[in-house]
Image: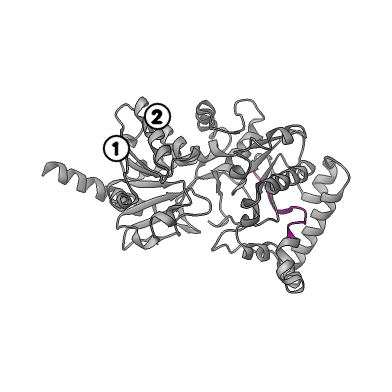
Amino acid sequence: MSLRRNRWRRGVTSSVCGYLRDLLIAFLPVRRIPRVLRIVLLGVDPKFVFLVHPRRKEDIYIAWPFAWPFRLLLRRYFYSWLRHLPPTILDVVKTPSGVNGVIVSSTWLPDALIHNRKASLKEARKCIRFAVKLSRKGASLGLGEWWPFLTKRGEAVQKYAKDRGMQVTSGYCGTLCSLQLSANEIAKVSDLRLSELRVLILGVGKMGASIAQALVNEVGRISVFDKNRVKQERVLRELKLQRGKTVIAGLESADQIPSALVECDFCICTTSNLNKILAANELPHGTIVLDDSRPEAVPRIYDKGRGILVLEGGLLKIQGVRMSYDFGFGNHEEVFGCLGETYMLACDGGKTLAPTVGDVDINNFHNMLGSRERLGVEAGGFRSGSIFVDPSDIAGIVKKKHVRKELDVNE
């Protein structure tokens, strides 16, 4: 539900009333609630639903402060009992365009989801049925947190949702757009051309490989590392086939990561295994990390003295969005790229954009980049947790690296 350093909390009374409403919705013997009743119960007629799950045990008590007595009563059976409960509505998302939505959470913790894939798919279907009840026909369902991974990037539940009048998206195109825009912004604030930037990508799974494909022929150098050597070599071959002036390089071992962080202008992390490769205290001076991994691979650090900035990766800004829920980087207009995609799909109504299921479609990615301004979506700000990061701090680190590079060349 919430992320660490999250100050978002619900009152006991409001959380009790909210969950009684959610129970009513879950047990109503209809596939889709009538529009008038949706507006009465939610205050909006949702065009999209964004699905998440609690990240830690503490998140349950932030969203449901009334749960403490049940925890004391049921003791070690509490979390297994919790898994039998229907999903819950965390917040309503309102936008100036009138394309509104809701954030829905499963009651399952990550350990339960990851260790029983068959049961997790069953839970996903239960959440879809709940989402269908809340929303109009043709609404978009965005998969947040671990749901894309658990549902094979939406492929395992696509037909189930479609048969019930809902379109599923993994949100990977939106996340890819956000990372591309972040790279553009880093170049802009540093007074550099994008083609001058050197980027390190840690983790070349679906998202890491996709951002590498998006940046090839755009930036000056791409270095990649993945613990899976076969996967890394495959991605390197694909990049080298289409490279123009971009230099492509692969790291031979995790021992080379610190020196690569120093050499490259910034790093995009898409793997949650970084804590097994590199400890946070080993980050060298002059490190900028865009951490798009979930759960977070690197603790959020904003250390001006050491020149270490660990930023939220994958953020988009929905202009004028209103919601009380805090994903861990404050109550602002920034949202995760996957939520941004879900919103854009709901706005677009199938005219230009398609949901992302399975691999990222590069044409859909470019269409989304081109449509975002029309749909009121722009690049997210730079944040480290809930702290706003001054762009001048980013520019200072990047410029120093380029001055050092010029001196090395002249010598």
What residue span does the magenta drawing correspond to?
Answer: 82-96
Number of numbered tags placed on the structure image: 2
Q: Is residue 95 magenta?
A: yes
The answer to which of 292 and 223 lies nearer the viewer is 223
Specify the quadrant that holds the N terminus. Answer: bottom right
Q: Does the image show residue 339?
A: no
Q: CA distance from mark 1 to mark 2?
A: 22 Å
Q: Is residue 60 rendered to the left or right of residue 268? A: right
Where does label 2 land, which residue? Answer: 238
Q: Position of residue 117 (x, y in %)?
A: 65, 47
Asked if residue 227 lies in the magenta stretch, the reply is no
Q: Quadrant of residue 85?
A: bottom right
Circle 1: residue type: Glu
Q: Is residue 367 above or below residue 21?
A: above
Instruction: Kindly identify the amino acid type of the residue bearing the numbered disc 2.
Output: Glu
Frontmost residue, 336 versus 319:
336
| 62 lies left or right of 44 | left
